[in-house]
Amino acid sequence: MKKGFCILLSSALLLTGTVPTWAKEERLLLEPHEYRGIVGTTNFYRDDVLQSSDAEIYLKDGYVMLPLRTFFTSINPDAQIYWNSVDQQAGVLLGESSIFLYVKENKIVVNREEQPVVGKMEVKNGRLFIPLRNWLTILNQCGYQLTDADLHWDSTKQEVTVTVRENQIIFEENLKTPVISGEGQAPLYAVALTATYSGIQNLGDGYFLGIDDTEGYYKYAYDILDSNGKLKSHFAPGEIFRMEYLGEGMFCVYTERWQQEYVMDENGQKQFDVAYDSIGDFHEGLACVSDEKDGQKVEGYVDAKGTLQIPLQFADGGYFSEERAVVRDLETRKCGVIDKKGNYVVEPKYKSCKSFQDGMSLVQTEQGYGYINKQGEEVIAPQYVWASDFYDGTAYVLEEQNGSVWLINTKGEKVKKMADQPGDSYESNAYCLRISQDVVLPSGAEKNVDHYYDKNGEISMEQGKLLFRLSEGLCSVLDEKTQKYGFVDKTGEMVISPMFREARDFKDGYAVVQVQDQWGVVKNPLLQK
């Protein structure tokens, strides 16, 4: 059986954490904060205020080892942290920046770019520690400004000090700020609270994975549950390494770390062996498979029985959407679009293509970005320096660098001028634009975002944070009185009462929650008939 690499940590997993309520801030450019840690103790300070930490700072191979959670939450209390103890991988959302840490590979990726690593990361007593010097690299990539001079080691006191200059956000007083209000309703459980599992994952499509790690590493037990809490499949401790949901009721079983062994249905019935290096998710009945031929990667598509429906003939294959899939030609390396028979409906001539959304695909040529329809016709000629997908009949476009951002319709007509780019200060005063549930950012907007917009115009940063966190119309927030998490809607009205120790994002109508040491799944009341 061939082996295929699969990234466990994804943006979806990265966004499954909870966030506190937001507070009104004022912009103080490059406000310095001092972080101080004492080796051999759990004492870690921000501006001489002791931070919460249950992990002792220590020295290894000449490097000061700081715990990940303590440092990130001291930098930003809203930091969201995901830890996969099986593969020793961590994901962090720090503002608009994403950080992935791969302990076994000793690799750090910030905003999709791999960074140089000094020393070695280590897991100790269940906590992830990172050599201090790497924090300078991570924070600089996240929009903070640090130099080597900001890091100071006092060998006499066994004390390390880091000075971090933080950009603060401007708030316009005339922009509406959401206020958390109401008590909410009692949760409606799809999967009742239970202490059976050490954790539950929302796989999507109404499937959930119950994980029991009491037997230790490599000996996890797995249960597949449906939206009624019914047990569909069970794997005893150590029976498999792990499993992955492929969509449309199909699951891939791994018997070893990177080895995709076979595909099964929800009841655990084997459908076919994975005869390729890797298999992707099913969309509209087909899944992209990858293999190697003559020293290069080739991709094609199989059906739910494992039968090859479209031969392995592409350099890259995207998922099917609206009966179309974007592929990259093996010879020309250009992008085109195929139908479910593998025939080109759009010849491979573009630098890039995106999956169809609202019947439109965003394409790129030397002239810029434009849009094609499902017949391959360029309904909006490539001309923009940046553009978003269409959503509900509109898209955002930028006509020229440092020009204006416009909202356009499917005919390419300008509907509304959203904002004027700020010229030379673009990188430090970027705009965040949002289309319904899809967040889209112009180039450079990952750092120092000062202005937020929806389709109606500029909104406050607090409103932007709430919109960022919405999943299916709800956002988890921390109630200051009870110190428990609940769910609010886009106006800040409490919809599900705050009673959870942890409350993750909604996906396909459901969200995983934790109450004390029990895990369960709640339904989204906004989607109930």
Image: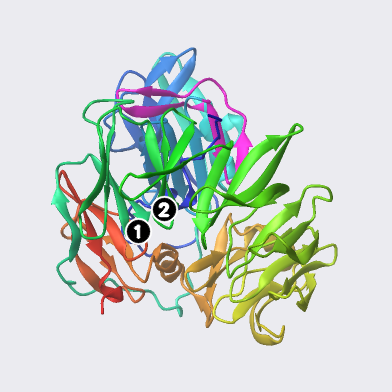
Q: Categorize mark 2 by other alpha carbons within 10 Å: few (<14), some (14-19), many (20+).
A: some
Whether 128 is among the magenta residues is yes
In the visual, does 510 lie left or right of 92?
left
Taking the magenta stretch, the answer to whether it contains residue 63 is no
Amino acid type, mark 2: Leu
Is 164 situated above or below 406?
above
Image-based side of 164 in relation to 373, left or right: left
User: Disc 1 designates what residue?
Assistant: 505
Between residues 389 and 130, which one lies in front from this camera angle?
Answer: 389
Q: Which percent across, then down, holds residue 382?
A: 79, 71
Label 2 sits on a secondary structure element that is loop
Looking at the rendering, the stretch of residues picked out in magenta corresponds to 105-132
Task: Check disc 1 and report its element: helix, strand or loop.
Answer: loop
Q: Are marks 2 and 1 in contact (CB under 8 Å)?
A: yes
415 vs 505, left or right, is right
- What residue does disc 2 label? 15
**Where's residue 242, x and y in %?**
38, 35
- Which amino acid type is shown beneath numbered disc 1? Asp
Does 246 sit above or below residue 421? above
**Category of crowding for the residue at label 1, using alpha-carbon neighbours closer than 10 angstroms: few (below 14), some (14–19), many (at least 20):** many
Q: Residue at x 14, y 43 (%)?
A: 195
**Residue at horizontal 32%, vertical 66%?**
509
Mark 2 vs 1, N-terminal side = 2
- Above or below residue 279? Residue 117 is above
Where residue 490 sits, quadrant-wise, is bottom left
Query: Which quadrant of the view contains residue 240?
Result: top left
Q: Is residue 430 left or right of residue 188?
A: right
Image height check: is 143 above or below 35? below
- Return the x and y of residue 286 as percentages of the image width and height: 55, 56
Which of the pair 519/231 is nearer the observer?
Answer: 231
3D distance between C-alphas at marks 2 and 1: 7 Å
Residue toward you, 271 or 346: 271
